[in-house]
Image (spheres, helix red, strand yellow):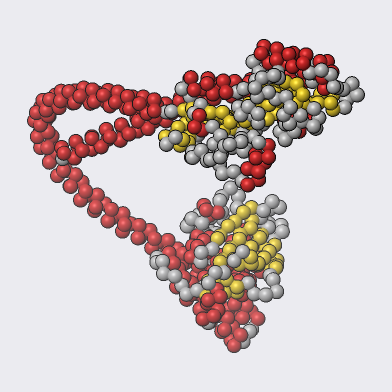
Amino acid sequence: MRLNTTALAAFTALCVAIGVFWLSLSFFESEEEAKARGRLSLYHSTVRSELERFSHLTYVLARDTHVIDTANGGPTGRLDRRLAAFAAQSGLDAIYLMRPDGTTIAASNAGRPGTFVGQDYSFRPYFQAARDGTQGRFYGIGATTGLPGYFIADAVQDAKGALIGVIAIKLDLTNLEETWRAAGEQVFLANRDGIVLLSSDPAWRYRSLRDLTADQRARIAQNRQFPGQDLAPLGWQPRGDARAVIGGAERIHLSASVAPHDWVLHYFADDNAAVTRSWLLTGLVMLLAGAGFLVSQVRRTKRIGAALRRSEAEEAQLREANERLAVEIEERRTAERRLKRTQDELERASRLAALGQLAASVTHELGQPIAAMRNHLTAAEIGGQPAARIIPRITGIVDRMEGITRQLKFFARNDREEFGPVDLGAVVQAALALVEPNIAKVGATTSVDAPDRPVLVRGNQLRLEQVLTNVLRNAVDAVEDCATRRIEITLGQGDGTGWVEVRDTGHGLGQASLDKLQEPFVTTRESGRGMGLGLAISANIVKAHQGRFSADNLAQGGAMFRIEIPQQGMDKDLSTA
């Protein structure tokens, strides 16, 4: 057991160490990435500044009177000296003026080896853009000097706006590389073709970030942008989570777009410091955790000693308590035996109560057919009807009484009667025939609104007749003392159920709810007019049919009882019939 505890503690410590390391590594890497974004923003601003620092100069020179005079055919010597002074003061590589055909006629390096004078630069994109009326910008290796530079050009026009030449400057951007290299950074600037123009690592310069298409290589060759360079792939692997593998090592990789050429400045940062700081923090946390564990062990030892001393005192108290507990156990056993006898007596009392309820139910339910039998015999005696007409009716009533005695077993057992297809229209007619003497006695009128075709449900016809008989009898009793004595019966079907509604113009349900009226011995009639079992029996019969029994007061007076019986399984009953 102790070995398992030790192993669990060691495993927990290992999990904590791993969790601390990865959480701290994520935090420190995010810090390193934030620092890298700051450095990238700085270098991006520097590159933009270098590109835009002299962007206005060609515009100004294109409107200089000396440049315009020379472009119109004036002498070039004075302009050569003027351009040389400008280039020396501003730190530009060269300033030169070309004719509309691209031939250089004046330059800041005139009279020196590698001068631009006499060279044709009509193939350069910056010359073509300026000639077409927009400022030309281009980065490439010089066709004359073999040195890279950034070219800016603007058109020179005469007083009438006609093109008479193109003025261009060449800017050396390699000082950016020296700055990056001196700071120990890994940075490169790539053009829209993915070719590295400037880099802190000379080996990366003029390498391509992706494979060049044949059209790209043809355009580069036509512009003589990188003469003598094979533009081989750089061999790096960018990743989507701000990281990339370059030079065989994984680095933080961030990039920023440089306008107006769609160039991209790439910055790489080493995050080894984040790993080191994560290991140091993990070690410190584990050291503190170990110290805390030792302190807890010392305290635990003290607590165990105090607990042992308390246990010796509590042991004596426990023995005394065990003796008292033995006495209490015996007393509880005696009480349980008495409780068991009481429960048996309650069960017997409950069965007797149910038996009494069943007897009352039988009396109530048999009252209706007996009264009907008496009415038929009286009518036969008064009217002198032959026995052949009376006997079938009495026989039907006797069958009805026999069925009632079978049905009332529903309160004593849960056995389900045999179900089959039942026409609710036939059920309504049978129930009306049974309560017809009661309806005639109170002088009530009845109406039946039924569809043309049978309303078939799945159930037991005799039990459903009992439900309708109880509901109709309640309706007759409800309208007995009312000025308007009308009972309306409506049949219908829908949503997989057949339903019957019985509406009366009686006194309604009052403040009693249907749930309350469904309880045995609860009734809204005066004393001596019934025991309140009709709705209770009806509700149980509907429940046995998986149906729904509801009632409500009507706004115009009276009550409405609704009986819904499912039709599911009826097709199967019909097919097996």
Name above or below for residue 203 compared with residue 292.
below
Query: Does residue 11 appear anywhere in the picture?
Result: yes
> Does residue 255 appear in this view?
no
Q: Residue at left 68%, top 16%?
A: 87
User: Residue 417, percent across and down?
Assistant: 46, 72
Front residue (pair 537, 141):
141
| Residue at 83 percent of width and 15 percent of height | 65
Point out residue 146 in the picture as x, y percentages from the top left corner: 61, 29
The quadrant in which residue 558 appears is bottom right
Q: Give x and y (percent) for residue 372.
A: 57, 73
Q: Is residue 27 above or below residue 514?
A: above
Task: Please count the marks in the image.
Answer: 0
The quadrant holding residue 159 is top right
- Horizontal side of 467 relative to 339 (left or right) equals right
Up/down of 121 relative to 406, above or below: above
Q: Residue at x 60, y 23 (%)?
A: 173
Q: Please give the name of the residue rendered at 12% of the width and 25% of the height, measured from the top-left corner.
A: 305
Q: Name the foreground residue: 56 vs 497.
A: 56
Using the image as rendered, state which of residue 351 and residue 240 is in the foreground.
Answer: 240
Left or right side of 216 for 325: left
Which of the image's four quarters has the N terminus?
top left
Asked if residue 324 is positioned above or below residue 345 in the image, the reply reads: above
Task: Provide residue 312's location: percent of width, then percent of height.
Answer: 9, 28
Left or right, 201 with respect to 215, comes to left
